[in-house]
Protein backbone atom coordinates (compact mmCIF):
# COMPACT_ATOMS: atom_id res chain seq x y z
CA UNK A 1 0.00 0.00 0.00
CA UNK A 2 1.30 3.47 -0.83
CA UNK A 3 2.00 5.82 2.04
CA UNK A 4 -0.60 8.21 0.59
CA UNK A 5 -3.37 5.60 0.76
CA UNK A 6 -2.18 4.50 4.21
CA UNK A 7 -2.25 8.04 5.61
CA UNK A 8 -5.03 9.74 3.64
CA UNK A 9 -7.24 6.72 2.98
CA UNK A 10 -7.18 7.29 -0.79
CA UNK A 11 -4.99 8.39 -3.66
CA UNK A 12 -4.56 12.08 -4.43
CA UNK A 13 -6.84 13.20 -7.26
CA UNK A 14 -4.73 14.69 -10.06
CA UNK A 15 -5.79 16.96 -12.88
CA UNK A 16 -3.43 17.39 -15.82
CA UNK A 17 -3.06 20.34 -18.19
CA UNK A 18 -1.22 19.63 -21.42
CA UNK A 19 0.46 16.48 -22.61
CA UNK A 20 -2.04 15.32 -25.21
CA UNK A 21 -1.55 13.36 -28.43
CA UNK A 22 1.96 13.71 -29.85
CA UNK A 23 3.40 15.02 -26.60
CA UNK A 24 6.56 13.41 -25.26
CA UNK A 25 6.23 14.70 -21.71
CA UNK A 26 2.51 14.07 -21.13
CA UNK A 27 2.71 10.26 -20.91
CA UNK A 28 5.85 10.63 -18.77
CA UNK A 29 4.00 12.74 -16.21
CA UNK A 30 0.99 10.44 -16.11
CA UNK A 31 3.13 7.33 -15.72
CA UNK A 32 5.27 8.99 -13.02
CA UNK A 33 2.12 9.86 -11.09
CA UNK A 34 1.02 6.23 -11.08
CA UNK A 35 4.28 4.38 -10.42
CA UNK A 36 4.16 4.60 -6.62
CA UNK A 37 0.35 4.63 -6.39
CA UNK A 38 0.09 8.08 -4.83
CA UNK A 39 -2.22 9.60 -7.47
CA UNK A 40 -5.08 8.83 -9.80
CA UNK A 41 -5.50 10.96 -12.91
CA UNK A 42 -9.17 11.94 -12.79
CA UNK A 43 -9.44 15.10 -14.89
CA UNK A 44 -7.58 16.91 -17.61
CA UNK A 45 -7.21 19.44 -20.38
CA UNK A 46 -5.16 17.74 -23.08
CA UNK A 47 -5.08 20.37 -25.83
CA UNK A 48 -5.52 24.09 -26.42
CA UNK A 49 -8.31 23.15 -28.86
CA UNK A 50 -11.41 22.43 -26.69
CA UNK A 51 -12.93 19.72 -28.90
CA UNK A 52 -9.59 17.99 -29.34
CA UNK A 53 -8.96 18.28 -25.61
CA UNK A 54 -12.22 16.56 -24.69
CA UNK A 55 -11.64 13.79 -27.22
CA UNK A 56 -8.07 13.16 -26.11
CA UNK A 57 -9.12 13.18 -22.46
CA UNK A 58 -11.53 10.33 -23.16
CA UNK A 59 -8.78 8.54 -25.12
CA UNK A 60 -6.55 8.40 -22.03
CA UNK A 61 -9.42 7.03 -19.95
CA UNK A 62 -10.96 10.12 -18.34
CA UNK A 63 -14.69 10.15 -17.73
CA UNK A 64 -16.48 12.21 -20.38
CA UNK A 65 -17.61 14.80 -17.85
CA UNK A 66 -14.05 15.28 -16.59
CA UNK A 67 -12.35 15.58 -19.97
CA UNK A 68 -12.41 19.36 -20.17
CA UNK A 69 -12.04 21.85 -23.00
CA UNK A 70 -10.16 24.57 -21.10
CA UNK A 71 -8.26 24.98 -17.82
CA UNK A 72 -10.84 27.53 -16.62
CA UNK A 73 -13.61 24.98 -17.16
CA UNK A 74 -11.69 22.32 -15.25
CA UNK A 75 -10.88 24.60 -12.31
CA UNK A 76 -14.47 25.85 -12.03
CA UNK A 77 -16.17 22.48 -12.39
CA UNK A 78 -13.75 20.49 -10.23
CA UNK A 79 -14.02 23.14 -7.51
CA UNK A 80 -17.74 22.36 -7.17
CA UNK A 81 -17.32 18.61 -6.90
CA UNK A 82 -17.07 16.79 -3.61
CA UNK A 83 -14.46 14.58 -5.25
CA UNK A 84 -12.67 17.38 -7.13
CA UNK A 85 -8.98 17.40 -7.92
CA UNK A 86 -6.43 17.94 -5.14
CA UNK A 87 -3.40 18.61 -7.34
CA UNK A 88 -2.76 19.94 -10.83
CA UNK A 89 0.17 18.94 -13.06
CA UNK A 90 1.13 21.55 -15.67
CA UNK A 91 2.99 20.46 -18.82
CA UNK A 92 2.11 23.20 -21.30
CA UNK A 93 4.18 25.69 -23.35
CA UNK A 94 6.44 27.84 -21.18
CA UNK A 95 4.46 31.05 -21.48
CA UNK A 96 1.44 29.56 -19.70
CA UNK A 97 3.17 28.06 -16.65
CA UNK A 98 2.79 31.15 -14.46
CA UNK A 99 -0.81 31.98 -15.33
CA UNK A 100 -1.98 28.39 -14.88
CA UNK A 101 -0.11 28.07 -11.59
CA UNK A 102 -1.69 31.28 -10.31
CA UNK A 103 -5.15 30.04 -11.30
CA UNK A 104 -4.49 26.77 -9.47
CA UNK A 105 -3.39 28.61 -6.33
CA UNK A 106 -6.59 30.66 -6.42
CA UNK A 107 -8.47 27.36 -6.27
CA UNK A 108 -6.39 26.13 -3.35
CA UNK A 109 -4.63 23.43 -5.35
CA UNK A 110 -1.14 22.05 -4.92
CA UNK A 111 1.00 22.15 -8.07
CA UNK A 112 3.47 20.04 -10.02
CA UNK A 113 4.86 22.13 -12.87
CA UNK A 114 7.32 21.66 -15.70
CA UNK A 115 10.31 23.94 -16.12
CA UNK A 116 11.07 26.69 -16.82
CA UNK A 117 8.94 28.51 -14.29
CA UNK A 118 8.17 31.42 -16.63
CA UNK A 119 9.44 33.31 -19.65
CA UNK A 120 10.82 36.17 -17.55
CA UNK A 121 12.23 36.73 -14.10
CA UNK A 122 9.56 39.16 -12.90
CA UNK A 123 6.74 36.66 -13.40
CA UNK A 124 8.78 33.94 -11.69
CA UNK A 125 9.39 36.12 -8.62
CA UNK A 126 5.69 36.99 -8.38
CA UNK A 127 4.70 33.33 -8.62
CA UNK A 128 7.13 32.41 -5.86
CA UNK A 129 5.56 35.10 -3.67
CA UNK A 130 2.07 33.74 -4.33
CA UNK A 131 3.13 30.15 -3.60
CA UNK A 132 4.66 31.18 -0.28
CA UNK A 133 1.57 33.20 0.60
CA UNK A 134 -0.75 30.30 -0.26
CA UNK A 135 0.98 27.65 1.85
CA UNK A 136 0.54 25.17 -0.99
CA UNK A 137 3.09 22.66 -2.27
CA UNK A 138 4.84 23.52 -5.53
CA UNK A 139 7.04 20.81 -7.08
CA UNK A 140 9.14 21.95 -10.04
CA UNK A 141 10.04 19.01 -12.26
CA UNK A 142 13.80 19.19 -12.60
CA UNK A 143 13.38 15.46 -12.99
CA UNK A 144 17.01 14.41 -13.44
CA UNK A 145 17.63 15.18 -9.78
CA UNK A 146 15.35 12.25 -8.94
CA UNK A 147 17.89 9.63 -10.05
CA UNK A 148 19.15 7.66 -7.03
CA UNK A 149 22.81 8.21 -7.94
CA UNK A 150 22.29 11.96 -8.29
CA UNK A 151 20.80 11.86 -4.79
CA UNK A 152 23.88 9.90 -3.70
CA UNK A 153 26.18 12.57 -5.14
CA UNK A 154 24.29 15.39 -3.42
CA UNK A 155 24.37 13.56 -0.10
CA UNK A 156 28.10 12.84 -0.40
CA UNK A 157 28.83 16.52 -1.07
CA UNK A 158 26.55 17.52 1.80
CA UNK A 159 28.35 15.13 4.15
CA UNK A 160 31.79 16.43 3.15
CA UNK A 161 32.89 13.18 1.49
CA UNK A 162 34.85 15.00 -1.25
CA UNK A 163 35.80 18.10 0.73
CA UNK A 164 35.17 21.71 -0.17
CA UNK A 165 33.90 22.06 -3.75
CA UNK A 166 36.52 23.51 -6.11
CA UNK A 167 35.52 22.68 -9.70
CA UNK A 168 32.36 21.69 -11.56
CA UNK A 169 31.72 20.65 -15.15
CA UNK A 170 28.21 19.99 -16.47
CA UNK A 171 27.23 19.05 -20.02
CA UNK A 172 23.92 18.43 -21.72
CA UNK A 173 24.78 17.60 -25.32
CA UNK A 174 21.93 16.49 -27.58
CA UNK A 175 21.86 15.97 -31.33
CA UNK A 176 18.23 15.88 -32.41
CA UNK A 177 18.30 19.50 -33.67
CA UNK A 178 21.55 19.31 -35.64
CA UNK A 179 19.64 20.36 -38.76
CA UNK A 180 16.52 22.42 -39.40
CA UNK A 181 13.52 20.58 -37.93
CA UNK A 182 10.01 20.24 -39.27
CA UNK A 183 8.62 22.21 -36.32
CA UNK A 184 10.57 25.36 -37.22
CA UNK A 185 9.57 25.58 -40.88
CA UNK A 186 6.75 27.67 -42.32
CA UNK A 187 4.96 30.84 -41.27
CA UNK A 188 3.75 29.39 -37.96
CA UNK A 189 6.48 27.27 -36.37
CA UNK A 190 5.98 25.09 -33.31
CA UNK A 191 5.81 26.86 -29.97
CA UNK A 192 9.38 26.03 -28.99
CA UNK A 193 10.59 28.14 -31.90
CA UNK A 194 8.40 31.10 -31.01
CA UNK A 195 10.12 33.44 -28.58
CA UNK A 196 6.86 34.75 -27.11
CA UNK A 197 5.95 31.21 -26.03
CA UNK A 198 9.31 29.56 -25.33
CA UNK A 199 11.03 32.54 -23.72
CA UNK A 200 14.11 34.54 -24.68
CA UNK A 201 16.40 31.55 -25.30
CA UNK A 202 15.31 28.11 -26.49
CA UNK A 203 18.52 26.36 -25.44
CA UNK A 204 18.71 27.93 -21.99
CA UNK A 205 15.05 27.36 -21.19
CA UNK A 206 14.94 23.86 -22.64
CA UNK A 207 18.11 22.24 -21.25
CA UNK A 208 20.35 24.99 -19.87
CA UNK A 209 17.82 25.14 -17.05
CA UNK A 210 18.55 21.49 -16.27
CA UNK A 211 22.32 22.02 -16.39
CA UNK A 212 22.12 24.99 -14.04
CA UNK A 213 19.87 23.21 -11.58
CA UNK A 214 21.93 20.02 -11.64
CA UNK A 215 25.15 21.87 -10.80
CA UNK A 216 23.53 23.73 -7.93
CA UNK A 217 21.62 20.67 -6.72
CA UNK A 218 24.64 18.38 -6.45
CA UNK A 219 26.97 20.97 -4.94
CA UNK A 220 24.37 22.64 -2.73
CA UNK A 221 25.71 25.98 -3.96
CA UNK A 222 23.95 28.70 -5.95
CA UNK A 223 25.58 30.36 -8.95
CA UNK A 224 27.25 33.72 -8.24
CA UNK A 225 28.16 34.89 -11.75
CA UNK A 226 28.40 33.70 -15.33
CA UNK A 227 30.22 34.48 -18.56
CA UNK A 228 28.31 33.08 -21.50
CA UNK A 229 28.38 32.74 -25.27
CA UNK A 230 24.80 31.89 -26.31
CA UNK A 231 23.96 31.55 -29.97
CA UNK A 232 22.94 29.54 -33.00
CA UNK A 233 25.16 27.11 -34.90
CA UNK A 234 22.68 25.64 -37.42
CA UNK A 235 22.34 27.96 -40.46
CA UNK A 236 18.83 29.30 -40.97
CA UNK A 237 17.64 28.68 -37.42
CA UNK A 238 15.98 31.59 -35.61
CA UNK A 239 16.46 30.28 -32.06
CA UNK A 240 19.44 29.62 -29.79
CA UNK A 241 20.69 26.05 -30.04
CA UNK A 242 24.08 26.23 -28.27
CA UNK A 243 25.54 27.81 -25.14
CA UNK A 244 29.06 27.75 -23.67
CA UNK A 245 29.17 29.12 -20.13
CA UNK A 246 31.82 29.77 -17.51
CA UNK A 247 30.47 30.20 -13.99
CA UNK A 248 31.47 30.75 -10.41
CA UNK A 249 29.58 29.25 -7.51
CA UNK A 250 28.84 31.08 -4.28
CA UNK A 251 31.95 29.68 -2.56
CA UNK A 252 34.20 30.76 -5.47
CA UNK A 253 34.42 27.33 -7.12
CA UNK A 254 34.99 27.48 -10.87
CA UNK A 255 32.67 25.80 -13.35
CA UNK A 256 31.96 25.22 -17.02
CA UNK A 257 28.71 24.32 -18.77
CA UNK A 258 28.05 23.29 -22.36
CA UNK A 259 24.48 22.77 -23.49
CA UNK A 260 23.36 22.16 -27.06
CA UNK A 261 20.74 20.34 -29.10
CA UNK A 262 22.73 20.70 -32.31
CA UNK A 263 25.63 18.24 -31.82
CA UNK A 264 25.34 15.95 -34.85
CA UNK A 265 25.09 12.31 -33.80
CA UNK A 266 24.91 12.98 -30.06
CA UNK A 267 22.28 11.10 -28.08
CA UNK A 268 21.34 12.76 -24.80
CA UNK A 269 24.59 13.62 -23.10
CA UNK A 270 23.69 14.89 -19.62
CA UNK A 271 26.67 14.47 -17.29
CA UNK A 272 28.52 16.16 -14.48
CA UNK A 273 31.94 16.13 -12.85
CA UNK A 274 32.28 17.69 -9.40
CA UNK A 275 35.68 17.94 -7.70
CA UNK A 276 36.39 18.89 -4.13
CA UNK A 277 39.54 19.11 -2.03
CA UNK A 278 39.72 15.35 -1.40
CA UNK A 279 37.92 13.72 -4.33
CA UNK A 280 35.47 13.92 -7.19
CA UNK A 281 32.17 12.56 -8.47
CA UNK A 282 31.15 11.71 -12.02
CA UNK A 283 27.69 10.74 -13.33
CA UNK A 284 26.37 10.18 -16.85
CA UNK A 285 22.62 10.04 -17.44
CA UNK A 286 22.89 7.43 -20.19
CA UNK A 287 24.49 5.12 -17.57
CA UNK A 288 22.37 6.32 -14.64
CA UNK A 289 22.79 3.46 -12.19
CA UNK A 290 26.47 4.13 -11.46
CA UNK A 291 28.28 6.99 -9.72
CA UNK A 292 32.08 7.17 -9.91
CA UNK A 293 33.99 8.48 -6.92
CA UNK A 294 37.64 9.46 -7.40
CA UNK A 295 39.66 9.78 -4.19
CA UNK A 296 42.89 11.56 -3.39
CA UNK A 297 45.56 8.88 -2.81
CA UNK A 298 43.16 5.96 -3.26
CA UNK A 299 41.69 3.94 -6.14
CA UNK A 300 38.51 5.12 -7.85
CA UNK A 301 35.38 3.33 -6.74
CA UNK A 302 31.97 2.95 -8.34
CA UNK A 303 28.72 3.09 -6.42
CA UNK A 304 25.89 0.98 -7.83
CA UNK A 305 22.24 1.91 -7.45
CA UNK A 306 20.78 -0.05 -4.54
CA UNK A 307 24.26 -1.41 -3.78
CA UNK A 308 26.43 -1.26 -0.66
CA UNK A 309 27.66 2.01 0.81
CA UNK A 310 24.80 4.21 -0.35
CA UNK A 311 23.35 7.12 1.60
CA UNK A 312 19.74 6.94 2.84
CA UNK A 313 18.73 9.57 0.26
CA UNK A 314 19.87 7.33 -2.60
CA UNK A 315 18.25 4.22 -1.17
CA UNK A 316 14.93 6.01 -0.70
CA UNK A 317 14.93 7.11 -4.37
CA UNK A 318 15.35 3.53 -5.66
CA UNK A 319 12.69 0.87 -5.99
CA UNK A 320 14.09 -2.46 -7.19
CA UNK A 321 17.14 -4.46 -6.22
CA UNK A 322 20.67 -4.07 -7.55
CA UNK A 323 21.15 -5.26 -11.12
CA UNK A 324 17.64 -4.26 -12.27
CA UNK A 325 18.08 -0.91 -14.03
CA UNK A 326 15.96 2.10 -13.22
CA UNK A 327 15.76 5.15 -15.42
CA UNK A 328 13.99 8.28 -16.57
CA UNK A 329 10.41 7.37 -15.64
CA UNK A 330 11.38 6.28 -12.15
CA UNK A 331 13.41 9.43 -11.54
CA UNK A 332 10.40 11.51 -12.54
CA UNK A 333 8.27 9.46 -10.16
CA UNK A 334 10.60 10.31 -7.26
CA UNK A 335 9.51 13.95 -7.54
CA UNK A 336 5.85 12.97 -7.72
CA UNK A 337 6.30 10.86 -4.60
CA UNK A 338 8.01 13.68 -2.71
CA UNK A 339 5.26 16.09 -3.70
CA UNK A 340 2.66 13.59 -2.47
CA UNK A 341 4.44 13.26 0.86
CA UNK A 342 4.26 17.02 1.42
CA UNK A 343 0.70 17.37 0.10
CA UNK A 344 -0.65 14.60 2.31
CA UNK A 345 1.03 16.11 5.37
CA UNK A 346 -0.51 19.50 4.58
CA UNK A 347 -3.98 18.01 4.06
CA UNK A 348 -3.72 16.24 7.40
CA UNK A 349 -3.03 19.55 9.12
CA UNK A 350 0.64 18.90 9.81
CA UNK A 351 3.30 21.59 9.51
CA UNK A 352 4.33 22.06 5.88
CA UNK A 353 7.90 20.80 5.62
CA UNK A 354 9.00 20.21 2.06
CA UNK A 355 11.29 17.24 1.33
CA UNK A 356 14.74 18.80 1.33
CA UNK A 357 15.73 17.35 -2.04
CA UNK A 358 12.51 18.19 -3.91
CA UNK A 359 12.89 21.03 -6.46
CA UNK A 360 10.62 23.96 -5.60
CA UNK A 361 9.38 27.26 -6.98
CA UNK A 362 12.48 28.95 -5.52
CA UNK A 363 14.67 26.71 -7.70
CA UNK A 364 12.68 27.95 -10.67
CA UNK A 365 13.33 31.58 -9.75
CA UNK A 366 17.07 30.95 -9.47
CA UNK A 367 17.05 29.31 -12.89
CA UNK A 368 15.25 32.27 -14.44
CA UNK A 369 17.86 34.57 -12.89
CA UNK A 370 20.59 32.38 -14.40
CA UNK A 371 18.99 32.58 -17.86
CA UNK A 372 18.70 36.36 -17.61
CA UNK A 373 22.34 36.70 -16.51
CA UNK A 374 23.65 34.35 -19.21
CA UNK A 375 21.89 36.35 -21.92
CA UNK A 376 23.19 39.62 -20.46
CA UNK A 377 26.72 38.23 -20.45
CA UNK A 378 26.41 36.98 -24.01
CA UNK A 379 25.31 40.45 -25.13
CA UNK A 380 27.98 42.40 -23.25
CA UNK A 381 30.89 39.97 -23.48
CA UNK A 382 31.64 40.13 -19.75
CA UNK A 383 30.73 38.52 -16.45
CA UNK A 384 27.15 38.94 -15.22
CA UNK A 385 25.97 38.58 -11.63
CA UNK A 386 23.27 35.95 -11.18
CA UNK A 387 22.74 36.06 -7.43
CA UNK A 388 19.23 36.63 -6.18
CA UNK A 389 17.60 36.83 -2.76
CA UNK A 390 14.31 34.94 -2.53
Image (cartoon, rainbow, N blue to C red):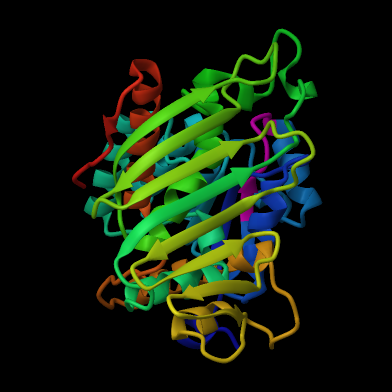
| In the image, farthest residue toward the front | 297
Q: Is residue 194 above or below residue 303?
A: above
* Rendering coords of residue 17 (x, y %): 58, 45
* Quarter of image, res 292: bottom right
Quadrant for the N terminus, please. Answer: bottom right
Residue 96 shown in magenta:
no
Could you tell me residue 128's position as x and y percent? Answer: 29, 46
On screen, residue 282 versus residue 26, left or right, reads: left
Query: Is residue 45 within the magenta segment?
Result: yes
Residue at image point 42% right, 63% down: 275
Give residue 355's position: percent from left, percent from top: 37, 71
The single residue placed furthest to the left in the displayed view is 389
Instruction: Residue at 75% x, 81% y: name it.
Output: 324
Magenta stretch: give its range. Answer: 43-50
Image coordinates of residue 168 in percent, x first then y, are: 42, 54
- Of the pair 166 and 390, the residue shown nearer to us: 166
In this view, 360 is above or below 267? below
Question: Is residue 113 visible in the rendered structure shown here?
Answer: no
Instruction: Please state the total of marks drawn on the protein image.
Output: 0
Relative vertical location of residue 128 with respect to residue 336 in this rendering, above or below:
above
Out of 140 and 174, give the one closest to the viewer.
174
Residue 204 left/right relative to 181: left
Q: Is residue 302 above or below residue 182?
A: below
What residue is shown at x 50% (from left), y 73% (from top)? Answer: 294
Residue 149 seen by the camera: yes
Q: Residue lying at the far bottom in this picture: please name it.
A: 308
Amino acid sequence: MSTTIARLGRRLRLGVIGGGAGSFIGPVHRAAARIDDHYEVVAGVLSSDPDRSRRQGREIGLAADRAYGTPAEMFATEGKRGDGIDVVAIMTPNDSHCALSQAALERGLDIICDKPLATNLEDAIELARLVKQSGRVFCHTFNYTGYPMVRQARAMVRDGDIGEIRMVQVEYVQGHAASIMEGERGDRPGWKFRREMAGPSLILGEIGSHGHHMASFVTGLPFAKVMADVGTVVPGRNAHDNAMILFRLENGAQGTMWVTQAAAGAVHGLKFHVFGATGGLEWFQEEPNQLRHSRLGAPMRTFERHGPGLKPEALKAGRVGIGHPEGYQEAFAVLYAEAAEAIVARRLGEALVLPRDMPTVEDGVRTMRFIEAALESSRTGGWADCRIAI
